[in-house]
Image: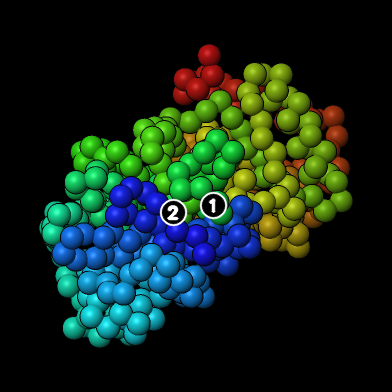
Amino acid sequence: MMIRKIEENVYNVGAVDWDRVIFDELVSTPQGTTYNAYMVIGKEKTALIDTVEPEFYEELKRNLDDLGITKIDYVISNHAEQDHSGALPMLLRDYPEAKIVTNSKCRNMEKALLHIPDEKFITVKDGDTLSLGDLTLKFVFTPWVHWPETMTTFLVEKRIAFTCDFFGSHAATSHTFAEQYDRIYHEAKRYYAEIMMPFRHFIRKNIEKIENLHQQIIAPSHGPAYSDPDFIINVYNEWAMESTKNMVLIGYVSMHGSTKKMVEYLVHALQKTGVEVRVRNLVSSDMGEFAMDLVDATTVLIATPTVLSGPHPAAVYTAYLINALKPKTQIFGVIGSYGWGGRTVNIIKSIIPTLKVKFLEPVMIEGAPKDDDFKKLDELAKIIAGEHRALGVMQ
Ligand code: FEO
């Protein structure tokens, strides 16, 4: 049980999931997470903003009981994904007078996902307000952070923006507000990379909408809240803007060492040109860290052996992930070793249709690398450095 006071009459009554290691069976969460639900107590009405992952409902209920909440008038639902909406049926059972307040897209999703009847909903439009007596909630649509229906709820008098997934971090913490030892920059960046990056054009517009509220606190539904909202807004602006860094990200897999030798040589050659290199083993690396590197990398290289007639499956998975995450990457290349030919390069190219990148001439070599092959890698390093100079990411 853990009630975290945000301000007078505003409490985080959500749950801390210290043990969660993977989310959506897809993204790693090595620091666990929280499902924040915020109780706002007005003089006339009460509102709960978002709920928790269903298996944590008892924790939410205990927090509400401990706070002395016996009646909830409104449950504001900012997002239909079940880590925030999944406990709605249990809440409606225990607080039968409560109405769910949300937008029409979210309502329709929750009817489909949770089988909640239509009469339980109050539907709001962008900019609508709801009075709790002395306090006012304003609904600001912030689509695609993370689904099309996502919205932010703004507590007008206290200038608190409840942004749900937007500005969140998968970080289990007992702190109400972000503190230095939460390593919050790292976890917020991981969260951005894994969940928000595909929507960065929407993110830029939504940041503007949030800033126009002149909020003093940002309270997301994962991780700690921010009493210094400029911190998280500034890093989001940096991550979402178009510029990249003087960095090459190499994701590699090697079966018998030939591709690894190529990577090691290329790393050295790139370093000599003044380009920063990040190398990730695609079989053993945390792909969340790989996704974080994608936020910054100007160039991405996939290094893979040819297995049978195509890339190693780990390289295929990675290429698919990159295509889905839509990073700002501007240059893309494939290197690797083969035994008897194959279609490795074409297969990888076919997996990344959404990327707007310049393709480098691939360096695919037969067997273990020889002197001539190393020369090709020297040449590749020079080409990459030249591209980085031309793009202005390297002085
Ligand atoms: Fe935290 Fe998109 O749910």
Q: Which residue is mark 2?
A: 4
Q: Which quarter of the figure has residue 187? A: top right
Q: Which quarter of the figure has residue 233? A: top left
199 or 298, nearer to the observer: 199
Q: Position of residue 330 (x, y in %)?
A: 48, 36
> Which mark is drawn over residue 226?
none
Q: Residue at x 40, y 51 (%)?
A: 5
Q: Is residue 221 above or below residue 243?
A: below
Instruction: Please say which color scheme the image uses.
Output: rainbow
Residue 156 visible in image: yes
* Tag count: 2
92 or 282, nearer to the observer: 92
Query: Which element carries disc 1, helix, strand or loop?
Result: loop
Q: Residue at x 35, y 82 (%)?
A: 94
Q: Which residue is mark 1?
A: 174
Q: Residue at x 73, y 31 (%)?
A: 266
Measured in 3D between alpha carbons, the distance from the residue under mark 2 to the one under mark 1, in whole angstroms, is 8 Å
| Left or right, 367 with reference to 88 | right
Q: Residues within 10 Å of mark 2 (few under 14, many from 20)?
A: some
Q: Position of residue 289 (x, y in %)?
A: 62, 45
Query: Disc 2 or 1, which lies upstream in sequence?
Result: 2
| Left or right, 52 with reference to 288 | left
Q: Residues within 10 Å of mark 1 (few under 14, many from 20)?
A: some
Query: Which element carries disc 2, helix, strand or loop?
Result: strand
Identify the amino acid type marked 2: Arg
Q: Is residue 78 above or below residue 375?
A: below
Residue 166 visible in image: no
